Image (cartoon, rainbow, N blue to C red):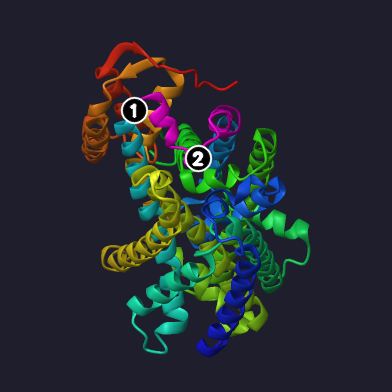
């Protein structure tokens, strides 16, 4: 596809999203923007969350990492599944019992205002970093395919990317996103299936059984790693990391939980979470199979692209055909924007409710404050993505994303775990100190882990370590006074 054809495809795609925004954003109220009036069908939420959870990072990085890491990522996915069960039956009952809009209000009820603000700020940092990683990857691909040939700078690419997200979310917020995510998830899944079909034909695999045999008998399809506990892919490390990544990056994340809290009641929210978790396991396995076929195809055709460049390079080859290339681009854009648009809405929600207490402001000012905040976070995301272009060069982005999550989400994990599993009260004014020290100590420990632990290298489990340090810190500032209200699940 030529750059102009790609631009035309993107333009049509966003016309559709803006049309959806027009019909779903007619009620330009804060209640619709933040909570979709708590009327979203659970099945739409569940389907749309697939795209939001996978994002452009999974779309590009998971297939690209198969050559180096085999199917080891699936160990993390199995941990995801258990994490979703914890969310459905531990966290969601608390959120619905307290009728929350922002999940960090729980920390205010449990501990006090400092804990509340600390949790919200930890989320804001985490989500800005995470959303920027995801959009950075897609912006790089669009730069390579479209804007470099047109001699348009990367900065302009980023500004266009963020501007388009703002354009279709600035009125309807989460109410619009529930519907756009459904469409985007559909495009993403179709893209993966179409690409697998093309690769199967190109590799003379004429039936599903032949594809299955090729994948299952390949050395790259190894899933479980039990041999070396020092290996970052060691099963127990990967499984626990996946479980806690899900609990934190979904269950303690305003972005993902905001969608769940738009369901009519707890029962529908739980149906959404369980059905979504089963589908997500299958979809991730599909991405890994795609990565294996891409790697085999590259090897047989002398293609040297690796890691995050593998899928885009093959998908845009002339012999792939315009249809397959078009579906790849639709899938990539859909995966990226289904994550980024909800991130922008959740950042706006958390900042408005948790940081500036928008509900205490005069009625006529609330909508204006929300819109100003929305614009502010759009600008911030753009600046961070541009900065990433100078920081990250030869990396597989999904692994960098998980590393960052280990440090930014750790304090949230410790805070919520302490609140749910103990009845102790704490000296609230010192919580921010603990939330600052825990990631620093975790980083120092991680940097020196091989020396301290006889060759053992800490991997994604740094998230658990970070949460544990936060938990211990909260014990140290504990006091005998009990929590004033009952906020345990029913």
**CA distance for labels 1 and 2:** 26 Å
Residue 416 placed where, x, y %? 42, 29
The numbered mark, 1 or 2, whose residue comes first in the sequence reads: 1
Label 1: few (<14), some or many (≥20) within 10 Å? some
Q: Residue furthest top?
A: 480
Rendered position, 286 above or below 157:
above
Residue 166 placed where, x, y %? 47, 68
Nearest to the observer: residue 353 or residue 157: 353
Nearest to the observer: residue 445 or residue 390: 390
Rendered position, 304 above or below 343:
below
Residue 80 placed where, x, y %? 55, 39
Q: Is residue 284 visible?
A: no
Q: Secondary structure at mark 1?
A: loop
Q: Residue at x 60, y 67 (%)?
A: 21
Residue 367 placed where, x, y %? 45, 58
> Mark 2 highlights which residue?
246
- Magenta range: 87-112
Count the numbered circles shown: 2
In the displayed structure image, the side of residue 77 where residue 424 appears, left or right: left
Marks 1, 2: nearer the viewer: 1
Q: Residue at x 62, y 48 (%)?
A: 37
The quarter of the rendered structure image containing the N terminus is: bottom right
Queried whether the magenta region covers residue 37, the answer comes back as no
> Mark 1 highlights which residue?
112
In terms of secondary structure, what is the magenta stretch mainly? helix
């Amino acid at each position: 596809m030529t750059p102009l054809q790609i631009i035309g495809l993107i333009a049509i795609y966003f016309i559709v999203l803006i049309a959806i925004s027009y019909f779903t954003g007619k009620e330009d109220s804060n209640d619709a923007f933040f909570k979709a009036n708590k009327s979203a069908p659970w099945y739409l939420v569940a389907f749309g969350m697939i795209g939001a959870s996978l994002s452009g990072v999974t779309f590009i990085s998971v297939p690209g990492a198969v050559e180096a890491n085999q199917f080891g990522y699936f160990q993390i996915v199995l941990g995801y599944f258990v994490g979703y069960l914890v969310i459905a039956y531990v966290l969601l009952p608390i959120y619905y019992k307290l009728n929350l809009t922002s999940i960090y209000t729980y920390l205010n009820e449990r501990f006090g205002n400092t804990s509340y603000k600390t949790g919200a700020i930890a989320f804001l940092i985490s989500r800005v970093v995470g959303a920027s990683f995801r959009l950075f990857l897609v912006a790089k691909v669009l730069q390579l395919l479209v804007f470099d040939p047109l001699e348009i700078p990367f900065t302009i690419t980023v500004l266009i990317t963020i501007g388009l997200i703002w354009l279709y979310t600035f009125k309807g917020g989460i109410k619009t996103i529930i519907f756009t995510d459904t469409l985007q998830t559909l495009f993403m899944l179709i893209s993966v299936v179409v690409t697998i079909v093309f690769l199967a034909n190109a590799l003379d695999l004429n039936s599903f059984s032949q594809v299955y045999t090729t994948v299952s008998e390949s050395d790259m399809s190894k899933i479980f790693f039990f041999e070396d506990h020092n290996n970052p892919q060691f099963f127990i490390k990967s499984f626990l990391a996946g479980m806690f990544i899900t609990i934190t990056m979904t269950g303690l994340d305003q972005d993902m939980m905001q969608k769940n809290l738009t369901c009519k009641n707890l029962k529908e929210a739980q149906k959404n979470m369980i059905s979504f978790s089963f589908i997500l396991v299958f979809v991730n396995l599909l991405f890994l199979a795609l990565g294996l076929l891409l790697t085999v195809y590259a090897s047989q055709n002398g293609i040297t692209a690796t890691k995050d460049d593998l899928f885009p390079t093959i998908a845009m080859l002339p012999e792939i055909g315009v249809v397959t290339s078009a579906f790849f681009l639709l899938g990539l854009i859909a995966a990226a924007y289904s994550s980024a648009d909800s991130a922008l809405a959740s950042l706006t929600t958390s900042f408005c409710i948790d940081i500036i207490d928008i509900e205490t402001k005069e009625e006529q000012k609330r909508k204006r404050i929300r819109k100003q905040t929305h614009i502010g976070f759009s600008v911030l995301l753009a600046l961070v993505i541009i900065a990433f272009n100078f920081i990250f060069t030869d990396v597989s982005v999904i692994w960098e994303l998980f590393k960052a999550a280990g440090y930014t989400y750790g304090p949230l994990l410790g805070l919520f775990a302490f609140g749910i599993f103990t009845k102790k009260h704490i000296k609230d004014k010192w919580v921010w100190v603990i939330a600052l020290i825990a990631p620093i100590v975790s980083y120092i420990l991680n940097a020196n882990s091989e020396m301290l632990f006889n060759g053992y290298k800490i991997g994604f489990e740094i998230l658990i370590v970070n949460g544990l340090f936060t938990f211990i810190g909260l014990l140290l500032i504990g006091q005998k006074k009990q929590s004033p209200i009952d906020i345990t699940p029913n």
